[in-house]
């Protein structure tokens, strides 16, 4: 009899939970998340800028915003997936610098620009793989690993290029992301052309 009473007592919380299942949180609770607050701040910023700057939302401004933010977005969007897993990569900018430096160095020494690009991409992939192996296979903290590789990649870039710079890239590439955009002058009805490439 005592054993039966114990079994029933152990099952009581489960039965009570099944009988009165907790209700789902109301939808408005999602607005209390800090991510929702960031979205609201972004929307408010866009509304404020659009109402105080006449050409904020026109085609030319959107084009140049995308032109200026494209490189950062290409790096930031994949990094988002790393952050979602609870890890971090602090060596991204240094890896970009090393890859770009190597590409310029190879082009300066007579390599075909597209082959130099391929080598730069391969070096970037190897640098990311190095971080991944150290974190996933050896179990090292990602913040410590990427601080170390940040210094490593930056140092190699300094060794390769030093204080010199590389110029003379093909115009077909340096102007590939730039095209003139026409803008109408307010009040005059006239149009003009502008371009970010000189």
Image (spheres, rainbow, N blue to C red):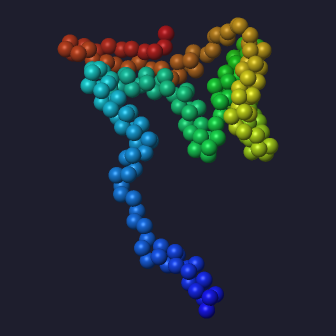
Q: Residue 196's x, y, as percent?
A: 46, 15
Q: Quadrant of the N terminus?
A: bottom right
Q: Residue 172's x, y, as percent?
A: 57, 19
Q: Residue 19's x, y, as percent?
A: 44, 77
> Against 9, is 135 above or below?
above
Viewer-closest of 70 and 25: 25
The residue drawn where x is 70% and y is 18% is: 101
Residue 38 visible to an observer of this rendering? yes
Q: Residue furthest bottom?
A: 1
The residue drawn where x is 39% and y is 46% is: 32
Left or right: residue 113 compared with residue 44: right
Viewer-closest of 119 and 146: 146
> Against 16, is 31 above or below?
above
Viewer-closest of 193 and 51: 51
Viewer-closest of 36 and 80: 36
Q: How many marks?
A: 0
The residue drawn where x is 58% and y is 44% is: 84
Q: Residue furthest top?
A: 164
Q: Residue 38's x, y, as percent?
A: 42, 37
**Residue 137 figure quarter:** top right
């Amino acid at each position: 009899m005592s054993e039966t009473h114990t079994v029933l007592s152990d099952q009581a919380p489960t039965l009570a939970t099944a009988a009165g299942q907790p209700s789902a949180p109301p939808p408005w609770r999602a607005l209390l998340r800090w991510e929702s607050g960031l979205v609201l701040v972004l929307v408010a910023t866009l509304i404020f800028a659009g109402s105080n700057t006449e050409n904020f939302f026109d085609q030319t401004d959107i084009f140049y915003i995308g032109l200026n933010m494209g490189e950062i977005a290409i790096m930031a969007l994949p990094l988002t997936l790393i952050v979602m897993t609870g890890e971090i990569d602090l060596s991204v900018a240094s890896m970009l610098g090393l890859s770009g430096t190597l590409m310029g160095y190879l082009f300066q020494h007579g390599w075909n620009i597209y082959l130099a690009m391929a080598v730069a991409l391969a070096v970037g992939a190897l640098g990311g793989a190095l971080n991944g192996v150290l974190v996933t296979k050896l179990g090292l903290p990602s913040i410590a690993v990427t601080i170390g590789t940040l210094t490593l990649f930056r140092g190699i870039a300094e060794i390769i290029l030093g204080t010199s710079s590389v110029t003379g890239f093909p115009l077909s590439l340096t102007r590939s992301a730039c095209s003139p955009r026409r803008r109408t002058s307010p009040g005059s009805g006239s149009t003009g052309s502008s371009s970010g490439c000189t």
